[in-house]
């Protein structure tokens, strides 16, 4: 059984490192407005992106560069310069969305594999072959594709790598081909600046043109007016089927603009799921328990194993984003002796330790606090004293405090400290 690559989002250098630490085999990200996530593209400079590529390569991991925006004529010369510049960073692939940009990459970055973005909406082997003949080595299939169709493409084009989305935001339109944001906000989705208008709450009205009447439609309590709001994709419970298909080469997690915690949990959960599926130890609920700790819009298994018209649970009409069931209280620093507070920490609080994969945690107990393992198999940390790196004692520490706080004992770099929230609030 072949190993399937786990591909995670890298919205910035920190999230790149976290995704790799928590189980990703490769990450994807971009620089500038030619990346389909302008906000995350601004998080990287050419220098920090080069640092990220070098960091990944030192660990035997890969970095794919997103150049998947839809350029206008006025941008072509700038795009050519961008492709040439990115090529000097020696990424492992270029992710592009249009035939014209495929041609430019062949011309300006020969030798760097080309991956076709999901924006190209490949659903069948005919379209896949056209791109394959143009030099594309991997297609990122449309989110609307079925596993049956993935198998069919692989049967006709066995040397073409196929990547599918397994987790993250779903677009109300067909793999991002939406104009709502452009019409309402002047921000063009397919050029990387979608305002996510589909996540807004709308008030519905009914009108009559003959006599000019207009009245507000009243809805039943709890129905809500998030009429375009798609639930988030979550295929963790179907990873075993994906593995067994033999047709998928890479599974992809959406979310370059999401939090470092999201990057960690999704990589961790899907890495476990892939490994367990390949070793006949698959436990769907274990992965779902982790994924449910992240902020989400409710989950759906989308269309990979169901036909669209068979689904009636893909929309969330009640709220735009849940608060999630955990807060990240701290992130362990590179020296492994201190953490930075991300929420709040008080003495004697019991805080769960969420560590990268395949690390060792040593139990300790001293004047500063303790690190210990409970019957649930998880490790926890408790502070007797909150001491800064400069030896100042605090009554508590809160987010915004940039002073590293001393740990009772060493914890692996990028370990997260997390606390279960008392209430799962809903925020729009």
Image (cartoon, grey):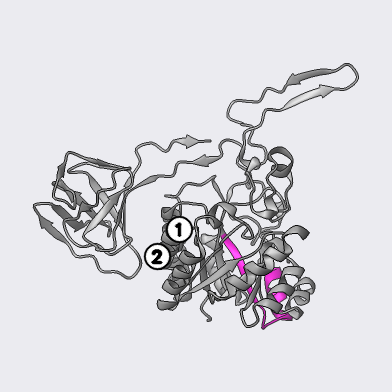
Residue 345 found in image quarter: top left
Residue 253 seen in the figure: yes
Depicted 283 relative to depicted 404: above or below = below
Q: Secondary structure at mark 2?
A: loop
Is residue 286 within the magenta segment?
A: no
Residue beneath the point at 43% across and 78% down: 60
Is 339 left, or right, of 249 in this rendering?
Answer: left
- Residue 326 x/y as whole percent: 37, 46
Seen from this angle, which residue lies furthest right?
210
Residue stretch in magenta: 148-166
Along the polypeptide, which appears first: circle 2 or circle 1?
2
Residue 3 on image: x %, y % = 51, 78
Which label was assigned to residue 232? Answer: none
Is disc 2 in contact with disc 1, using a CB cutoff of under 8 Å?
yes
Q: Position of residue 34 (x, y in %)?
A: 64, 60
> Which is nearer the eye, 76 or 278?
76
Structural crowding at the residue carrying mark 2, measured as other residues with C-alpha within 10 Å and reported as few (<14), some (14–19) or many (≥20): many
> Which type of secondary structure does the marked residue at label 1 adopt?
helix
Q: Which mark is residue 22?
A: 2
Identify the residue under disc 1: 263
Q: Residue reaching furthest left?
A: 367
Q: Residue at x 62, y 36 (%)?
A: 200
Tell whether position 154 is magenta: yes
| Residue in the image at 49% along x and 52% along y | 258
């Amino acid at each position: 059984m072949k190993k399937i690559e786990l591909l995670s989002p890298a919205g910035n250098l920190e999230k790149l490192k976290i995704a790799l630490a928590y189980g990703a085999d490769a990450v994807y990200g971009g620089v500038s407005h030619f990346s389909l996530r302008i906000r995350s593209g601004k998080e990287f400079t050419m220098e920090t992106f080069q640092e990220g590529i070098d960091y990944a390569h030192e660990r035997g991991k890969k970095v794919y560069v997103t150049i998947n925006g839809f350029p206008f004529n006025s941008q072509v010369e700038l795009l050519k310069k961008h492709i040439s510049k990115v090529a000097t960073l020696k990424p492992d692939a270029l992710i592009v969305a249009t035939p014209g940009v495929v041609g430019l990459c062949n011309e300006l970055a020969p030798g760097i594999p080309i991956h076709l973005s999901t924006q190209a909406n490949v659903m069948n082997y005919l379209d896949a072959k056209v791109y394959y003949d143009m030099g594309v080595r991997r297609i990122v299939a449309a989110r609307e594709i079925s596993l049956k169709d993935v198998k069919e493409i692989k049967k006709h084009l066995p040397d073409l790598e196929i990547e599918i989305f397994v987790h993250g935001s779903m677009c109300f339109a067909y793999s991002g081909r939406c104009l709502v944001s452009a019409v309402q906000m002047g921000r063009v989705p397919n050029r990387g600046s979608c305002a996510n208008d589909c996540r807004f709450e709308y008030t519905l009205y009914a009108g009559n043109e003959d006599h000019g009447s207009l009245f507000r439609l009243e809805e039943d309590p709890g129905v809500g007016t998030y009429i375009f709001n798609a639930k988030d994709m979550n295929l963790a419970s179907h990873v075993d089927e994906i593995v067994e298909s033999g047709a998928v080469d890479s599974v992809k997690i959406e979310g370059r603009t999401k939090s470092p915690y999201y990057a960690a949990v999704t990589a961790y959960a899907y890495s476990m799921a892939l490994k367990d599926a390949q070793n006949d130890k698959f436990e769907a609920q274990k992965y779902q328990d982790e994924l449910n700790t992240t902020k989400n819009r409710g989950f759906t298994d989308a269309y990979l194993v169901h036909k669209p018209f068979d689904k009636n649970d893909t929309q969330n009409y009640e709220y735009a984003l849940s608060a999630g069931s955990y807060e990240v209280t701290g992130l362990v620093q590179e020296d492994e002796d201190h953490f930075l507070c991300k929420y709040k920490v008080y003495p004697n609080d019991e805080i769960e330790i969420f560590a990268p994969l395949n690390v060792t945690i040593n139990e300790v107990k001293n004047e500063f606090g303790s690190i210990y393992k409970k019957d649930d198999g998880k490790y926890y940390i408790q502070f007797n004293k909150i001491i800064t790196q400069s030896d100042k004692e605090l009554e508590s520490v809160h987010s915004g405090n940039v002073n590293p706080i001393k740990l009772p004992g060493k914890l692996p770099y990028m370990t997260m400290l997390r606390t279960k929230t008392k209430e799962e609030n809903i925020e729009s």
